[in-house]
Image (cartoon, rainbow, N blue to C red):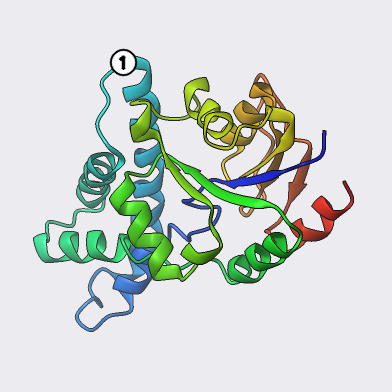
C-alpha cells in the first residue's frame, strides 16, 4: 500500500533535546557550570528515556513532564549542581526547544506531496503544544498524538495503534520517523514503514524489528518517500 501518513517522534527527531542546556550555558552567569552542559544534557536525556521504560514495565505511569523533571533532578545531582534557579531555567527552555534546521522545509515538502503529517510522542499534550508552536510547525500538522491518551509510554504497541485509530489507515500505509533506534525498531515490528533518523551515528539496536531505511537527518525524506 502507498504511504498516506507520515508520523514523527518529537524529541530528538523534530526538536533538539540538547538545546535547553546549550542555551542556558550561553546565558550570563552560567560560566561556572557551562563547560559541563554536554554531560548534563546527556544525563538528562538518558534518564528521561530510562524512566519511561521503567515506568511502562512497572505500570507506574506519570506524564512526561514529571519524567522530565525527575530526570533533570538526577542529572543536576550527578553534576553536583544544586541550583533551583538553573533547574527552573532549564525546564522553561525545554518548552521552547528549537527544531532541527531542516524540519520546517521538510514538513512543507511532505505536505506538498499530499501526505498527512502527525507527531506521535511520549510528550504530555501541553509540552507538545508549546514545542510545536514555538517551532512554528503547527499549521502543517494534521495531528499531535500523545501517549497520555493510552497511559503508557513507547514502545508499547497501544501507542503505535493510535495512528490507525486517528487516521483510519493500516500500519503499512504509515511512514514512521524516529531518532531513537529502539523506537524505530519497535515501530517496524508493529508494521509501520519505519525510517531511523540516526543523528548520533549510533549502532543499530538488536531488537525485534528493523527500520526499512536509515537517514542522517530528515533532509532526504521527501525524495525517499516520493520514490514510493
Q: Residue at x 61, y 52 (%)?
A: 200
Q: Position of residue 147 (x, y in %)?
A: 39, 34
Q: Secondary structure at mark 1?
A: helix
Of residue 228 and residue 187, the one placed in the foreground of this image is: 228
Q: Residue at x 48, y 59 (%)?
A: 15
Q: Residue furthest top?
A: 58
State which quadrant residue 181 falls in: top right
Q: Residue furthest front?
A: 168
Left or right placement of residue 101 versus residue 1 in this view: left
Q: Which residue is mark 1?
A: 58
Q: Position of residue 203 (x, y in %)?
A: 68, 39
Q: Considering only vertical position in the picture, is 9 above or below 210?
A: below
Q: Position of residue 34 (x, y in %)?
A: 31, 71
Q: Residue furthest right?
A: 227
Quarter the N terminus occupies: top right
Q: Considering only vertical position in the picture, is 143 above or below 17?
A: above
State which quadrant residue 2 falls in: top right
Q: Position of residue 118 (x, y in %)?
A: 55, 48
Query: What is the count of numbered marks?
Result: 1
Of residue 54 and residue 62, the one placed in the foreground of this image is: 62
Left or right placement of residue 187 versus residue 63 in this view: right
Left or right placement of residue 109 versus residue 85 in this view: right
Q: Residue at x 55, y 53 (%)?
A: 13
Circle 1 Cα neighbour tier, 10 Å, few/some/many (<14 / 14–19 / ≥20): few
Of residue 96 and residue 139, the one placed in the foreground of this image is: 139
State which quadrant residue 205 falls in: top right
Q: Considering only vertical position in the picture, is 92 above or below 208?
A: below
Q: Residue at x 29, y 52 (%)?
A: 126
Q: Considering only vertical position in the picture, is 134 above or below 185?
A: below
Amino acid at each position: 500500500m502507498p504511504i498516506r501518513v507520515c508520523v514523527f517522534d518529537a524529541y530528538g527527531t523534530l526538536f533538539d533535546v540538547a538545546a535547553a542546556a546549550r542555551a542556558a550555558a550561553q546565558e550570563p552567569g552560567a560560566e561556572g557550570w557551562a563547560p559541563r552542559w554536554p554531560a548534563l544534557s546527556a544525563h538528562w536525556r538518558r534518564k528521561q528515556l530510562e524512566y519511561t521504560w521503567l515506568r511502562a514495565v512497572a505500570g507506574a505511569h506519570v506524564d512526561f513532564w514529571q519524567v522530565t523533571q525527575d530526570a533533570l533532578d538526577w542529572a543536576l545531582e550527578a553534576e553536583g549542581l544544586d541550583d533551583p534557579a538553573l533547574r527552573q531555567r532549564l525546564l522553561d527552555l525545554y518548552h521552547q526547544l528549537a527544531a532541527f534546521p531542516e524540519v520546517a522545509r521538510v514538513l512543507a515538502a511532505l505536505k506538498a506531496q499530499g501526505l498527512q503529517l502527525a507527531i506521535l510522542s511520549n510528550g504530555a499534550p501541553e509540552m507538545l503544544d508549546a514545542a510545536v508552536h514555538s517551532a512554528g510547525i503547527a499549521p502543517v500538522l494534521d495531528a499531535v498524538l500523545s501517549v497520555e491518551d493510552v497511559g503508557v509510554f513507547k514502545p508499547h504497541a497501544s501507542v503505535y495503534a493510535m495512528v490507525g485509530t486517528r487516521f483510519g489507515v493500516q500500519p503499512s500505509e504509515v511512514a514512521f520517523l524516529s531518532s531513537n533506534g529502539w523506537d524505530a525498531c519497535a515501530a517496524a515490528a508493529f508494521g509501520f514503514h519505519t525510517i531511523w533518523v540516526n543523528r548520533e551515528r549510533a549502532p543499530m539496536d538488536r531488537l525485534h524489528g528493523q527500520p526499512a531505511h536509515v537517514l542522517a537527518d530528515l533532509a532526504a525524506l521527501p525524495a525517499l518517500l516520493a520514490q514510493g
